[in-house]
Image: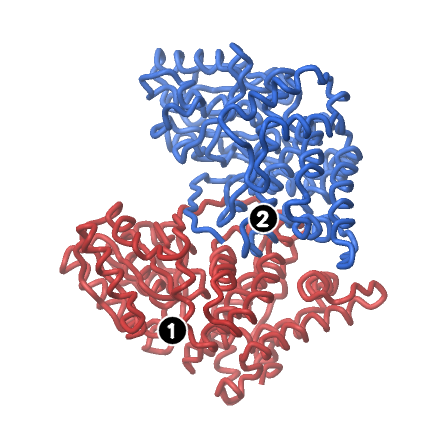
Chain colours: A blue, B red
Amino acid sequence: MENFVFQNQTRIVFGKGTEAETGRETAAHARRVLLHYGGGSIRVSGLYDRVCASLHGAGVEFVELGGVQPNPRLSLVREGIRLCREKKLEMVLAVGGGSVIDSAKAIAIGVPWAGDVWDFYLKTAAPRESLPVGVVLTLPAAGSESSNSSVITNEQGLYKKDAGGECMRPRFAIMNPQLSFTLPPFQTACGAADIMAHVMERYFTRVRGVDFTDRMCEAVLRTIIDNVPVALAKPDDYDARAQIMWAGTIAHNDLLGTGRIGDWATHGIEHEVSGIYDVAHGAGLAVLFPAWMTHVYGNDVARFARFAVRVWGVEPRFDAPERAAREGIERTRAFFHAIGLPTTLKELGVPADRFDEMAGKATEKGLLGSFARLGRADVVTVYRLAR
Amino acid sequence: MENFVFQNQTRIVFGKGTEAETGRETAAHARRVLLHYGGGSIRVSGLYDRVCASLHGAGVEFVELGGVQPNPRLSLVREGIRLCREKKLEMVLAVGGGSVIDSAKAIAIGVPWAGDVWDFYLKTAAPRESLPVGVVLTLPAAGSESSNSSVITNEQGLYKKDAGGECMRPRFAIMNPQLSFTLPPFQTACGAADIMAHVMERYFTRVRGVDFTDRMCEAVLRTIIDNVPVALAKPDDYDARAQIMWAGTIAHNDLLGTGRIGDWATHGIEHEVSGIYDVAHGAGLAVLFPAWMTHVYGNDVARFARFAVRVWGVEPRFDAPERAAREGIERTRAFFHAIGLPTTLKELGVPADRFDEMAGKATEKGLLGSFARLGRADVVTVYRLAR
């Protein structure tokens, strides 16, 4: 087990009707905020009105900036930074899913920074200061509501990059599982894949002696596997939605990575796909994770066999660990298929003609991953396995 | 699942040699601190010298107060409060296990409070302000290094009471598993029982739809069950000690209780025993938990059967859930016995003559528990089952 430092200050306000607390939670940090959101769904659902009423009730003034798209864009981040500076706003309140929150985080670190906010994503600067960020979560998936990072797409060159720093963790996250009742089934499924990917990136490690976090990872995976089919069959099943939402936060708040070294190659490989083709991040991960697994499981068959047995209930055959390992990969792929996700890049609408270009971009800073170290040719192989 | 608010700000600095960070972590909060500890073991081990050197190196001045006993005493807390006020100390640094940390927390809330610190334990006042508390943990057991509570024994009347409040969470906890290598086997085992009890108090709930936290609870229990025998057989097995230490923190940092209503009757029943007889808290819990289980499992046989299957690997016999439930209880008792803990009050040196008096004290504020509501007669029954 590796040494680690872990601290997560996000205040989680979880449960039915908790969006009514938005004003009170926000007022604890600021009186003038940027209200940041995506498209029209929060207006249709009435959430927009309830959040505004709660802010008004707490005496919080706000300026609005909607229009965040999936794979959030740098241009809108720049617009948000300009607005915050011009209107002297003290906080960014994100109402939405991971894209909105990531965009809010980017704005929040951009405001006090004298340089260009993209510096943080190019890693030529590290964020040390941020406006406070608050969240009203609508979509369990990215875990951004309690994570220390943000992913933004720069439209110029279609680069999708991440920035991270402890100052980026939201101060609070209001999480009402009822808000996820109306998600389209495809978004629920993409969220599940994203959550599972966050856990699997940490689970497949070369670090030994991490039994406790192994078991915590397995707990999150089993929770998602058990509850997502329930939520798809009965979208207003509160308890199923609640398990998914809370597990989704824990999947990516850094607890599960304590003492481990995560892999994260698949995220890098996927970012190049969704940077160019604008596919849903979760769908991209569902396609690419089993391909990555197929390429690398030989590096530690025992770990993949354990994954198969503990997560998927595969019979523990000690005489045939490789068979168990491969069965675990197949079960992973079959689960994604069963919940309505694509299993090939072709289904995602991603042709094979730019694999080498994407692999080049993914590895331009060096080898990817830690469980296995992947170069450009390996990444092309993963794309081909997912074809 | 119940609505909840969860926030835990304790900064965990975990791993080999991390006591060298004590000065730096402390200096982030204060320049003049009370160094609080128990007996001579930290001097024998050299930890005392390393902590002092780290504090000196960071320019932190300190006043010492040692002598904390197991089941920490109110009189020493009062002495600590007096010292902090007289010497204008700004922080309490606890070096030790749960007793030292609980004593430190009591001092820290007592200093800014105009009334008597015992008010907080009588619940006639709630702690709203505290000096910062820092921890160098030597014994994985109580989880106090990241919890929001403290248990203190008032020698006058032998009352053992708890106080709680969010301001009481330590600011940082330095956790080096190597420091637990030299624990006597009995203390390692008592710690294991305490950790398991913290989880089981939360696990046995009447709240439905808590699948995710059920699984997290099971992960902690399995981790302890697997790793404690390893640590007993090989006291310097770093990875086993590390799993136990980190699982012990998570067991009681309130994450596992999110969305649930815990029971906590067994802690109340045990506190009366250790308040009078000064037995080790973990040993008391090891004796009383199986007795409590035996008395209450009929309230939800399915949950106890699940516990047996998921935690102890009992065969899932759907035609005989009660048999599985009882087998889970027997396995719990057998595990405590196997790691060297007593299984009867008699072995603990607790005679039967004051059962009714202790049951009266335990229930003087009303019925105990939530999974089952226990009155005085029920508590006597639990003591008798543990006789």
Residue carrying label 2? B259
Query: In the drawing, does residue B212 fall left or right of residue B115?
Result: right
Towards the viewer: A189 or A13? A189
Kindly identify the amino acid type of the residue bearing the numbered disc 2.
Gly
Q: Residue B94: x percent and y percent?
A: 31, 61
| Callout 2 touching callout 1 (CB < 8 Å) | no
Q: Callout 1: 10 Å neighbours few (<14), some, many (20+)?
A: many
Label 1 marks which chain's residue? B
Is B19 drawn above or below residue A163 in the view shown?
below
Residue at x 45%, y 23% (from the top left corner): A121
Residue carrying label 1? B71
Q: Residue A106: x percent and y percent?
A: 45, 22
Is A242 drawn above or below residue B312 in the view shown?
above
Q: Residue A104: x percent and y percent?
A: 47, 23
Label 2 marks which chain's residue? B
Is A276 drawn above or below residue A144 in the view shown?
above
Query: In the drawing, does residue B97 fall left or right of residue B62?
Result: right
The answer to whether residue B313 is visible is yes
Q: For the C terminus of chain A, which image quadrant?
A: top right
View extreme (right): residue: B319
The number of discs equals 2
Q: Residue A346: x percent and y percent?
A: 76, 20
Displayed quadrant of residue A181: top right
Towards the viewer: A160 or B27? A160
Is B180 drawn above or below residue B11 in the view shown?
below
**Mark 2 element type:** loop
Kindly identify the amino acid type of the residue bearing the numbered disc 1.
Asn
View extreme (left): residue: B86
Residue at x 64%, y 41% (from the top left corner): A242
The answer to whether residue B209 is visible is no
Q: Callout 2: 10 Å neighbours few (<14), some, many (20+)?
A: many
